Image (cartoon, rainbow, N blue to C red):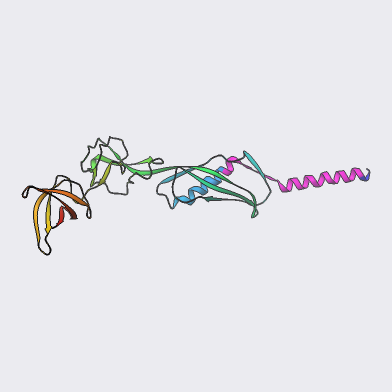
Amino acid sequence: MTKTVVRIALIIFCSVIFTSSSFAAVLTQGQLASIVEKQVVNQLSGKVQGNLEAKALLLPFNQFDIPNGKLSVHVSLDNYEFAPKKYAQITIKVNGQKVRSFPTPIALTLYQDVWVATENIPRNSTLKSTEFVSERKNVTQNYALVITSDKNIADYISVRDIKSGNIIDKRFVMPKPDVSKNSVISLIFDTGGINIAIDAESLQNGCIGDTVRVRSDEYRKFYTGKVIGINKVLVQI
């Protein structure tokens, strides 16, 4: 064997050794997606109530050759608030050395225990415990509006008609007010040290601190006052 042939053989042998040692493993798209999705769920689980599912989208390769060694994948989210779609920066490292880094979108699905109407509920009625039940629902698109079942809505009032089977959310109900529309209230006149109270009718719903209009049949007048307690409205004279 000539020296030239030996030299070529050594070059080929060394090239094979280098290639096999530098790229001795394959990371598939499915493997990376599984790692990323688990990390996203773990990072958000303590900050988002309910069951969360994540799906990594648009990963840039079907499989990726990586050096042999200890693999680590770091996922950095744009923030820790829930949204149907988020963005994450993915960093792949082997033996602590960065191999590749890229951004990717993450689709999130959220399931929560929420209140669901068991029958039709008319507008302006106080909810009864027989009219709703707790169910686990996909709330991804209306997560900011739902009322989770750890909230007591037995004393809520419907502000719109609610159909049986619908999730009861913040668009349909409000907490029971301290003063209810068309109810008899105590109208208190503050005349600078002397308080006079008469019966009147509230023309609006209101909670403590709200301003509402009331009507006095006794004086045949309308007044605007501040809700100061349950069925109590104060008017400054």
- Magenta highlight: main SS: helix
In the rendered image, the quadrant that contains the N terminus is: top right
| Left/right of residue 97 with respect to residue 184 in the rendered view | right
* Residue drawn 19% across the image and 50% down it: 212
Q: Which quadrant holds residue 58?
A: top right
Residue 194 point in image, percent of width and height: 9, 63
Q: Nearer the viewer, residue 180 or 218?
A: 218
Q: How many marks?
A: 0
* Residue drawn 9% across the image and 51% down it: 199
Q: Residue furthest right?
A: 2
Q: Which residue range is magenta in the image?
A: 4-32
Q: Is residue 16 magenta?
A: yes
Residue 148 point in image, percent of width and height: 34, 46
Q: Is residue 53 magenta?
A: no
* Residue drawn 32% across the image and 39% down it: 167
Q: Is residue 193 above or below residue 41?
A: below
| Left/right of residue 199 with respect to residue 71 in the rendered view | left
